[in-house]
Image: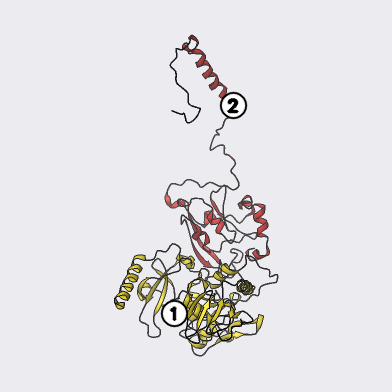
Chain colours: A yellow, B red
Amino acid sequence: MPKVTIDGQSIEVPDGTTILQAARMIGGENVPPAMCYHSKLKTSGGYCRTCIVKVSKGSDKDPRPMPKLVPSCRTTVMDGMEVQNNTSPEVLEARRGVVEFLLINHPLDCPVCDQAGECHLQDLGYENGAANTRYDFKRRKFKQIDIGPYIKLHMTRCIMCFRCVKVADQITDNRVHGMLNRGDASEISTYIENVISNDFSGNVIDVCPVGALTDRTFRFKSRVWFTKPMDAHRNCTKCSGKVTLWEKGEEVLRVTTRKDKWGESEEWICNECRFEKKHINDWVVEGPRHIDPHSVISLNHYENVAAKLKLDIAKQQKQLASKK
Amino acid sequence: MQPLTNRSKVVVKKEMSLYERIYLPAVISGMMITFSHFFRKKPTIQYPEQTRAFSGVYRGQHVLKRDDNGAERCTACGLCAVACPAEAITMTAAERKPGEEKLYREEKYAAVYEINMLRCIFCGDCEDACPKEAIFLTDRKVNSEVNRKSFIYGKNVLVEGIEKEKRVDVSLRQTAAVLAFKKHKEFDHNS
């Protein structure tokens, strides 16, 4: 079991763990942000460079530092490795540069965008971005594309994270969309605007860290922070049926996967659950979804704190009993 | 006991003089003070026939601005509603259809925009929050109404007229510093 130290905190992790995963095991504020890495998607990561860190000591055997900053989502840990994230001014400076590059072509139409409030790029820009841009040229523009009846593609907002391509590759069969062209001109596209008809294609909406892929059934219905997230489930033959409902009053405006604290989907859901079951009677509601208090979504929402406390106490009592 | 200030006076019960006992000089001097007030400038005005000029930054009834081409600036982003401490603002967004570009500036617009004037505390947080320069408080007063429902102002009241003479001037709220700040290139997307 290699032992890795990230910003002074040490942890022992299994072989083959990446620095990012190790940082997430430690948790707290020293976890590098990630835009393209998704824990449930194989071979994701390595595109966006927001998770770069400094390896100040390679390993116990070879203590030389790595010559350049490395993407933590693609670098596996070595025994005795020492990593600097927030403690290294070099990393923070480089990350600011990465954010500036990501925002070069981004239209900043957050007031219109449905993703606003749960957008990873918004959070990243807020934490690491500069208040103004140095870019003088025209931002690239695309027409909006309807990918089938349920999904809308705003190519202008895309940051080329490849997450949706990985979903299409790994979760759905017969991938019909991917990246076209190269470099500055690259874009996500379906061949001749092919309809994605696969049962799990809706998951591309949830993995999209920005507002490039959005739900057409939720389009402009409400801002995210005016809806109330509730955990719910139903018996579904195709998927686990475990979802988050986004309600406004009695109305179910949107159905998404449950996202963990890194904003990554826990389990994939099928298109039937996502787009067609928009009635509260279709679901067994479990209770309010826990939302990070720092998020704008948690504004004006009151979680059932008492119920949660009871659960926690019961858990601890069980642990104590098992120890004895 | 040590007095706390030197303003306290010791009350003495002394015998009044004849001049003081006839009271007339004191009455007359009092009347003179009253009489002199007739010739002073009056601090009151005859409201509502006369009105005072309001400060340009007075926080009165809201206006939803249009841009120079007459298109509504509001894009129903909901930031005013989430900033509102009284939860007075509600809105419903809608998608702009092709051909409506002259009516609405962005692809999304507020189909319904309501401010409950009874809830509103005129704090001005909504105009601070607005990223689109759409909502402003003005120096206009909110009228009295006969029932509660009439205080829920919809778009028919809030949106300014499309004609030049019906536009509401909010330039006083936008100081030179604010205007200079908004000329920055990074606010291009806002124009």
**Crowding at mark 1 (Cα within 10 Å: few <14, some 14-19, many 20+):** some
Disc 1 marks which amino acid?
Glu
> Element under label 2?
loop
**Could you say which quadrant of the image residue A312 lies in?**
bottom left
Q: What residue would you read off at disc 2? A: B40
For marks 2 and 1, give the CA distance: 79 Å
Q: What residue is at 57 percent from the left and 30 percent from the top?
A: B42
- The x, y position of residue B100, in whole percent, is 59, 66
- State which chain disc 1 sits on: A
Residue A95 image point, x, y percent: 61, 73
For this orientation, the residue located farthest to the right is A136
Residue occupied by mark 1: A266
- In the image, residue B124 sits, relative to residue A146, either above or below, namely above
Work out whether B75 lies above or below A242: above
The chain to which mark 2 is attached is B
Say what amino acid the circle numbered 2 marks: Arg
Disc number lying in front (2 or 1):
1
Q: Is residue A241 visible?
A: yes
